[in-house]
Amino acid sequence: MWMPAHPLPTHHTLQDDFLRSRGDGCKSCTSSRRMEFRGEICLHFPGGLESLDKPLVWAFPKVIVCLDCGLAQFTVPETEVKLIEQNL
């Protein structure tokens, strides 16, 4: 099992209550120990050298990270999805 290099915070937050109240566990390990972070993700179009002329798509989603297995989940915001569609 994955172990963090530094001890993880153990404080209880309203975010914890929200995630638990929805009954959503981690989709990988079913843990309820998850935290929400702000993310910065740069999406590159697939296709190797042929896609170098396509723009990078930056997204800044909220990312839910499981503190037990490390699975991270996010949704690409609608504006960035439209940018991807325009450049296919």
Image (cartoon, rainbow, N blue to C red):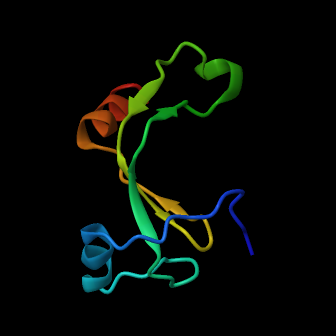
Residue 39 location, x and y as percent? 42, 42
Number of numbered discs visible in the structure rendering: 0
Residue 1 location, x and y as percent? 75, 75
Residue for point 63% across, 63% down:
7
Front one among 48 and 23: 23
Residue for point 42% across, 64% down:
35
Residue for point 26% across, 82% down:
22
Q: In the image, is 59 to the left or to the right of 17?
A: right
The image shows residue 39, relative to residue 33, as above or below, that is above
Front one among 64 and 88: 64
Residue 51 location, x and y as percent? 59, 22
Residue for point 59% across, 74% down:
68
Q: In the image, is 47 to the left or to the right of 22?
A: right
Residue 73 location, x and y as percent? 45, 60
The residue most toward the top is 53
Front one among 4 and 10: 10
The image shows residue 8, relative to residue 42, as above or below, that is below
The image shows residue 71, relative to residue 55, as above or below, that is below
Which quarter of the rendering shows the C terminus?
A: top left
Q: In the image, is 46 to the left or to the right of 19?
A: right
